[in-house]
Image (tube, helix red, strand yellow):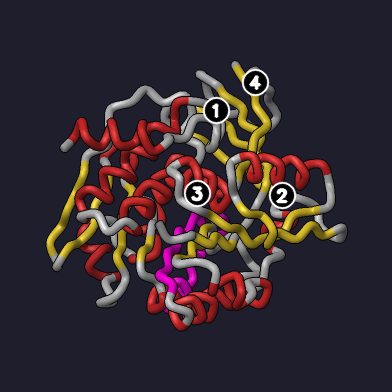
Amino acid sequence: MKRVLVAGEINVDLILRSRGTLPALGKEILVDDAVLTLGSASAICAVGLARLDTPVSFVGKVGADPWGDFCLETMRAAGIDVAGVVRDAALKTGLTVSFTLPRDRALVSYLGAIGALRESDVADAALRSAGHLHVSSFFLQEGLRPGCRALFARAHAAGLTTSLDPGFDPRERWGGDIVDTLAEVDVFFPNEVELHAIAGTADVIEALRRLDNGRTRIVAKLGAQGCTTLDAGRPVSVAAFPTVPVDTTGAGDSFDAGFLHAWLEGRPMRECLLWGAACGSLSTRALGGTGHQADRAEAERLVASAS
């Protein structure tokens, strides 16, 4: 199995679970549960890969603070190589507060160190030690974003494959630079909202065709509707696995981990989609993105049930 290098953001998540409604300005609500856990799309994907026995290294930045210590301890315990993570006393580790309902969620984030990573912080030696490079949160990683295409080009020059999960653009500008970046991306993981905004159409298949550049495999994550990609110009879809979610935080990042694990093993495309769908579904069993991610045996059993 190729080692995956994740270059990305690290923060803590405060998950507040509610069976009712989201808070309105000027009002207070009570929630049913709360947990402080490792957050950030990049770190959740990295832990998901490690749970599937994929070797993972991480490059990123955190503050020299208790939240940063907590994140690094959690990642080490998951088996991730965090030698490339810098603890910077001039930064604060980022925080996301997630209000999670059974079928949806709302997020409030303090970026902190999330935007501090730069393309130049990813050393050539780190690239040479891996076989694949993954980046998440294109729009949140404000320091990495301008050099993201150059980083992927360096990875390709070093013989790596690459993948990108754009994440949501909190400013909802959806700049055209992400389309330019796709020229150096092998696998792209937008969810339905992100796909529609970036491609400029509400039709999934049309959006996939508009973004098709002849190189990038675009995998549309469609939540309860499953996932879809184009294979030789034809749609290939997989239904979502039935589940009663406790919390959907990080489900898309766990999907990325499952798909990449199968894709890096050279499995057929439909099987890769099934691995993504299985890992995304199983991750919703507990609060937080890493609270109950699938291990390899669990994912294999669920994928086999759909084969």
48 lies left or right of 193: right
Q: Nearer the viewer, mark 3 or mark 2?
A: 3
For the residues labelled 4 and 3, the Cα–Cα distance comes to 31 Å
Going by the numbered disc 2, the residue's amino acid type is: Gly
Q: Residue at x 63, y 72 (%)?
A: 122
Secondary structure beneath dot 4 equals: loop
Q: Position of residue 35 (x, y in %)?
A: 65, 27
Q: Residue at x 54, y 58 (%)?
A: 137
- Residue 143, compared with residue 104, is above or below; it is below
Q: Is residue 174 magenta?
A: yes
Q: Residues within 10 Å of mark 1 (few under 14, many from 20)?
A: many
Label number found at residue 287: 1
Point out the tag, 3 or 2, that comes first from the N-terminus: 3
Q: Nearer the viewer, mark 4 or mark 2?
A: 2
Secondary structure beneath dot 2 equals: strand
Q: Position of residue 249 (x, y in %)?
A: 51, 37
Residues at badges 1 and 3 in contact (C-beta under 8 Å)?
A: no
In-front residue for pair 159/146? 159
Is residue 192 something that shows in the picture? no
**First to last magenta residue range:** 160-180
Which residue is the site of mark 2?
A: 94
The answer to which quarter of the image holds residue 148 is bottom right
Label number found at residue 45: 3
Going by the numbered disc 1, the residue's amino acid type is: Leu
Question: Which quarter of the rendering shows the N terminus?
Answer: bottom left
Q: Position of residue 278 (x, y in %)?
A: 32, 37
In-front residue for pair 234/266? 266
Q: Position of residue 83 (x, y in %)?
A: 69, 59
Label number found at residue 32: none
